[in-house]
Image (cartoon, rainbow, N blue to C red):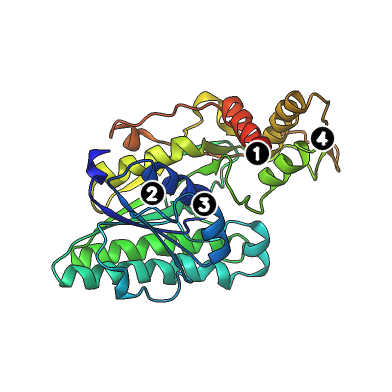
């Protein structure tokens, strides 16, 4: 990671799953200055209490949809991870999804544009999502970074997330072309792993339930398989893109289904029940409200060959990743 030596790195959404792991990795070195930004001051202070007295660490509590203060000072790299992933927020507070994804991205771009005009260039890595892809075929689909011709219908409840991620990419590329800015897109598949503040998603609800010895209850089986990736692999991919990624390029940060990581949430629930049961020395079962599905909905695999060409590899399989997530949850 010699690329990062001596650099000032601003991380938005620093208390989230990926953001907090990035902070930990960068703060393991003494030659990088890290600025952790989040709208929640309590999470910043609690989550990063071990770093608060470090001279190379700074926290900023603000909504990413508000313009960044020039008092932050010049930065070499912005990792824009801010944005909710909770299905409940997507469904009931859609404006809270659009704002950080679109306005937050613009604020990052404007900050670097103003900085560039004063003679200091910086790189922006925009965190996008596998949800910019859609599958309307009757079989599983493998996509590369160019296969963006299908997307969620605008009347889909999930469109507020997927389409705002798509628009964030469009905006970033527009700034790159018009103002010659250094922008790279990281298009993440479904990232899992332990984090200090668990997101409000089905996966983490299953983790919490199973680690207290409770059975898991799902609405149905046969859900679409998705391209999952353990957080350590995702962060290594992100740092690889930050260092080696080509300006104006998009990179899938994904498992491509390697090491068993192509799995539906109901299949992951079965793994969680099994592995949590072993840890807690009890039997945990998975129950379904409806009858077993006759077939599985088609899913999407994200080709990761472009990221692999930079020297990165998937290292964590689904069983090992879920087992480590459970271990970390219990230990904390």
Which residue is label 4 attached to? 213
Q: Is residue 156 visible?
A: yes
Label 1 sits on a secondary structure element that is helix
Q: Is residue 40 visible?
A: no
Tell whether label 4 touches label 2 (CB within 8 Å).
no
Residue 209 position in % (x across, y down): 77, 42
Question: Judging from the image, what secondary structure is the residue with disc 4 in?
Answer: loop
At label 3, counting other C-alpha atoms closer than 10 Å, the crowd grade (few under 14, some 14-19, many 20 or more) is: many
Within 10 angstroms of label 1, few (less than 14), some, or many (20 or more) residues?
A: some
Q: What numbered label is drawn on residue 186? A: 2
Cα separation between marks 3 and 2 = 13 Å
Q: Position of residue 145 (x, y in %)?
A: 37, 45
Question: What is the C-alpha distance between the residues marked 4 and 3?
Answer: 33 Å
Up/down of 217 relative to 63, above or below: above
Q: Is residue 153 above or below residue 129?
A: below
For the residues carrying marks 1 and 3, which lies nearer the camera in this image?
Answer: 1
59 horizontally vs 221: left or right = left
Q: Circle 2 — which element?
A: strand
Q: Earlier in the sequence, mark 3 or mark 2?
A: 3
Q: Circle 3 sits on which residue?
A: 131
Of marks 3 and 2, the one in the foreground: 2
At x 28% / y 49%, what residue is drawn? 249
Mark 2 to mark 4: distance in Å? 37 Å
Residue extending farthest to the front is 53
Front position among marks 2 and 4 = 4
The residue to which callout 1 is attached is 329
**Which numbered disc, 2 or 4, marks the residue that appears first in the sequence?**
2
Residue 183, picture quadrant: bottom left
Disc 4 residue crowd, few under 14, some 14–19, many 20+, Cα 10 Å: some
* Observer-nearest of 43 and 30: 30
Q: Position of residue 96 (x, y in %)?
A: 57, 70
The disc, 2 or 1, on the residue closer to the chain's N-terminal end is 2
């Amino acid at each position: 990671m010699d690329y990062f030596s001596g650099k000032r790195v601003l991380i938005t959404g620093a208390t989230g799953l990926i953001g907090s792991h990035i902070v930990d990795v960068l703060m393991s070195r003494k030659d990088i200055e890290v600025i952790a930004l989040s709208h929640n001051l309590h999470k910043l202070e609690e989550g990063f209490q071990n770093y608060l007295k470090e001279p190379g660490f700074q926290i900023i509590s603000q909504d990413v949809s508000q313009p960044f203060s020039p008092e932050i000072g010049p930065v070499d790299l912005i990792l824009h991870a801010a944005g909710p992933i909770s299905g409940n927020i997507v469904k009931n507070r859609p404006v809270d999804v659009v704002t950080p994804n679109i306005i937050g991205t613009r604020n990052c771009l404007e900050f670097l544009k103003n900085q560039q005009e004063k003679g200091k260039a910086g790189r922006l890595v925009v965190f996008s999502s596998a949800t910019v892809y859609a599958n309307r075929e009757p079989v599983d689909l493998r996509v590369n970074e160019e296969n963006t011709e299908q997307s969620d219908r605008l009347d889909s409840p999930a469109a507020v997330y997927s389409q705002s991620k798509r628009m964030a990419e469009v905006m970033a590329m527009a700034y790159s072309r018009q103002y010659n800015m250094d922008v790279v897109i990281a298009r993440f598949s479904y990232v899992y792993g332990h984090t200090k503040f668990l997101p409000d998603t089905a996966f983490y609800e299953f983790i919490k339930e199973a680690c207290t010895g409770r059975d898991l209850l799902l609405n149905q089986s046969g859900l679409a398989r998705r391209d999952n990736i353990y957080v350590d692999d995702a962060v290594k991919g992100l740092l690889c893109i930050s260092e080696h990624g080509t300006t104006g390029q998009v990179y899938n940060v994904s498992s491509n289904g390697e090491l068993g990581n192509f799995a539906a949430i109901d299949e992951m629930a079965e793994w969680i029940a099994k592995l949590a049961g072993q840890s807690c020395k009890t039997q945990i079962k998975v129950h379904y409200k409806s009858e077993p599905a006759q077939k599985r909905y088609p899913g999407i695999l994200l080709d990761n060959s472009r990221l692999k060409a930079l020297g990165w590899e998937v290292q964590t399989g689904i069983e090992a990743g879920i087992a480590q997530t459970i271990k970390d949850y219990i230990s904390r």
